[in-house]
Amino acid sequence: MTTTAAFGTLPSKDLLTIAQLGTGDIETIFDAAAALKAGRSEHNALLKGKRLAMIFEKDSLRTRFTFDVGMQDLGGSAVFMDHRDVRLGSRESLKDMARNLERWVHGIVARTFKHRALEELAANCSIPVINGLSDYLHPCQALSDVFTLTEKWGDVRGRRLVYVGDGNNTCHSLVHVAARLGAHMTVCSPEGYEPNARVISEAMLMARESGSDIRILNDPEAAVRDADAVYTDVWASMGQEDEIEERSSIFNDYRVDEEMMAWAKPDALFMHCLPAHRGQEVTAPVIDGPNSIVYDIAENRLHVQKAVLVLLMRDKDA
Ligand code: CP
Ligand code: NVA
């Protein structure tokens, strides 16, 4: 019989942003993820009888499957509510939605257009709310990204991650995790597409404690020069479809191709949250090449999110 006490605890009810987590909390998640990854069968009743509501305003493959399969692995269940045709808050207030859901389920994962919608759900219920991606942040992705790097390197401290492209939700959470854990972080975006100023100032504060060096640049060659890993994401995120054409020309020099990877350190890893557009933000030889770890990251979404589910949803004294 496995108890969950060994997994430790997280300080907050919800996981909306990495900024809610300290360095030790991220280590707690990584330790639990590694344990869950190593011993699936002994953990298959950790969330027995627990139900997760999944509310998605946008498409998803990885986040939807990994949370659903993760709940099943842990002995619980998940109910998916497709909100792609109806914006959250339009049929009834988010407050009422939260107050209903907490009577039926033990946790919520939501993928929303507005980050504020997640905050409103979380503020109005006693059950955990997990950010499955908002317009602002993608914390579960970033935890899985850096967990995968710890598997490859042992420790990310002092390594340099270089994110090339749009300063978006994926980028913001990656900057947060890197800054918390003492990895150096460079973001290289076209002018006007740099990461959010609040994220950068939060990261700068974290970096003072962790020793992370954070740089925001516009020149890809200068940025990628000392990269241990190069990360990119789509040029137009979900909800920005009408900007695709304009962004394609603005981001043209920010495509991660073999020439760009050659500027990085030898054996630099390639990372992407997926879905990817081959020929746009990354070329096929790079994403399908030997240094790409995109499917390892996708696999780890399952293990890391199972850790988050256990840490937030189990009975804390079990
Ligand atoms: N990376 C990621 O979140 O993938 P999905 O959009 O498919 O969930
Ligand atoms: N930045 C992308 C990430 C998808 C996982 C988007 O928001 O569409």
Image (cartoon, rainbow, N blue to C red):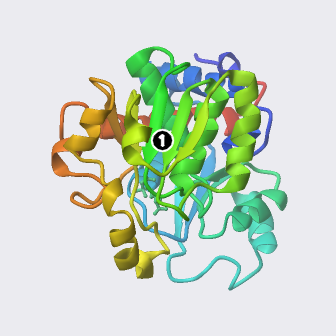
Question: What is the quadrant of residue 291 in the picture?
Answer: top left
Q: Quadrant of the N terminus?
A: top right
What residue does disc 1 label? 70
Q: Nearer the viewer, residue 304 or 265?
A: 265
| Numbered disc total | 1
Question: What is the quadrant of residue 206 in the picture?
Answer: top right
Image spot of residue 171 (x, y percent) = 53, 49
Vertical relation: 115 (above or below) 127: below
In the image, what residue occupies the spot 67% across and 32% down? Answer: 311
Q: Nearer the viewer, residue 121 or 119?
A: 119
Left or right of residue 40, residue 199 in this image: right
Three-letter amino acid code of the residue under disc 1: Gly
Q: Is residue 47 visible?
A: no
Left or right of residue 24, residue 295 in this image: left
Image spot of residue 83 (x, y percent) = 54, 75
Vertical relation: 120 (above or below) 88: above
For label 1, the crowd category at 10 Å Cα-Cα, with few meaning under 14, some 14 to 19 and many 20 or more, is: many
Disc 1, SS: helix
Q: Nearer the viewer, residue 135 or 56?
A: 135
Q: Quadrant of the C terminus?
A: top right
Vertical relation: 11 (above or below) 58: above
In the image, what residue occupies the spot 79% across and 39% down? Answer: 12
Q: Residue furthest bottom?
A: 91
Image spot of residue 183 (x, y percent) = 56, 26
In the image, what residue occupies the spot 42% across and 61% down? Answer: 60
Question: What is the quadrant of residue 202 in the picture?
Answer: top right
In the image, what residue occupies the spot 69% across and 23% down? Answer: 210
Residue at disc 1, CB closer than 8 Å to ligand 1: no
Vertical relation: 32 (above or below) 114: above
Q: Is residue 88 visible?
A: yes
